[in-house]
Image: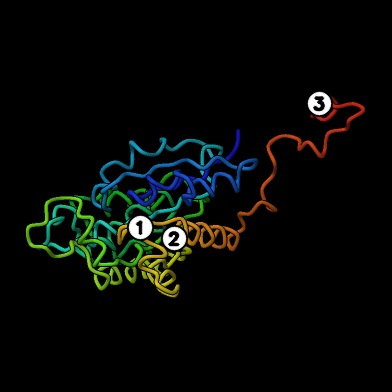
Amino acid sequence: MRPKIYIFGDSITEESFGGGGWGALLAHHFSRTADVVLRGYSGYNTRWALKVLDKVFPAAGGSDDAPLAITVFFGANDACLPDRCSAFQHVPLHEYKQNLHSIISTFKLFHAPRLAHVKDHPARGVCRATLLRRGGKKRWPKTQILLISPPPIDEDARLKFPYVDNPMGMPERTNEAAGAYAKACVSVAAECGFPVVDLWTKMQRFPDWGKACLRDGLHLTQTGNRIVFDEVIMKLRDVGLSLESLPVDLPLISDIDPSNPLKSFEN
């Protein structure tokens, strides 16, 4: 069976299989080497993501069941301001970091000393004591994890596209808050030794990024999707996952002998 790459996140991931979406581009890129499995949930934050992990991903099995990689792309909803119209999606910054650690520890092998800083939290799927008792082992120790930070926010555009009633007339997200969560995401990646796409920083390097990269101040245009795709491909290549390193699952047409086509399928 083909290996799998899971993309796990909020609406920016859920929408990514649309035309020109970064998930669709990823699936096309790996079309003969790996299946890209979409697990995007519009509106979700890291607190909710932890609640559904066991429903989203298959139970631990043998090494053959382990995905090649998982992208974890949350933070845009966690960063909703607690006193604005989307306050129900807000997750405090310190909890956001803890939740990212918990999501990662669900997939990866962490030795007990690396979990010493982790505290119990009622919203988290596995408590620190349980992780320590298991020696930090959970599911897929060889799976590559790639964190993706929330994107920047165009606050003026968010006022034009509120998700819920906005009687205050103020954006439910700010670019400053998104930047704080992006910085926290980058910090967690560094603490855990995993690659990260700092989308908040990357996108703001583009001229007129608010209109070029974001269609409603939050979700991605085709240009924004292309940025995510290019960054994900680069980060996966850096950890050894590329078209050159992955086997093709069946013979390519160029490898089939026209004089004896069926010979190519004997092995």
Q: Earlier in the sequence, mark 2 or mark 3?
A: 2
Give the spatial CA distance, label 3 vs label 1.
50 Å
Please, what is the three-letter code of the amino acid marked with disc 3? Glu
Mark nearer the viewer, 2 or 3: 2
Tell me, for residue 224, which label it has, or none.
2
Q: Which residue is mark 3?
A: 266
Which element is circle 3 on? Answer: loop
User: Counting other residues with Cα less than 10 Å from the Cα at mark 1, is it few (<14), some (14-19), or many (20 or more)?
Assistant: some
Instruction: Report which quarter residue 76 is drawn in.
Output: bottom left
User: Counting other residues with Cα less than 10 Å from the Cα at mark 2, is it few (<14), some (14-19), or many (20 or more)?
Assistant: many
Give the spatial CA distance, label 2 vs label 3.
44 Å
Q: Which residue is mark 1?
A: 215
Instruction: Report which quarter residue 121 is drawn in.
Output: bottom left
Please, what is the three-letter code of the amino acid marked with disc 1? Arg
Residue 54 visible to the viewer:
yes
Please, what is the three-letter code of the amino acid marked with disc 2? Gly
The quadrant of the picture occupied by the C terminus is top right
Say whether residue 182 is left or right of residue 155: right
Mark 2 touches mark 1? (CB < 8 Å) = yes
Tell me, for residue 4, which label it has, or none.
none
User: Counting other residues with Cα less than 10 Å from the Cα at mark 3, is it few (<14), some (14-19), or many (20 or more)?
Assistant: few
- Vertical comparison of 219 with 173: above or below: above
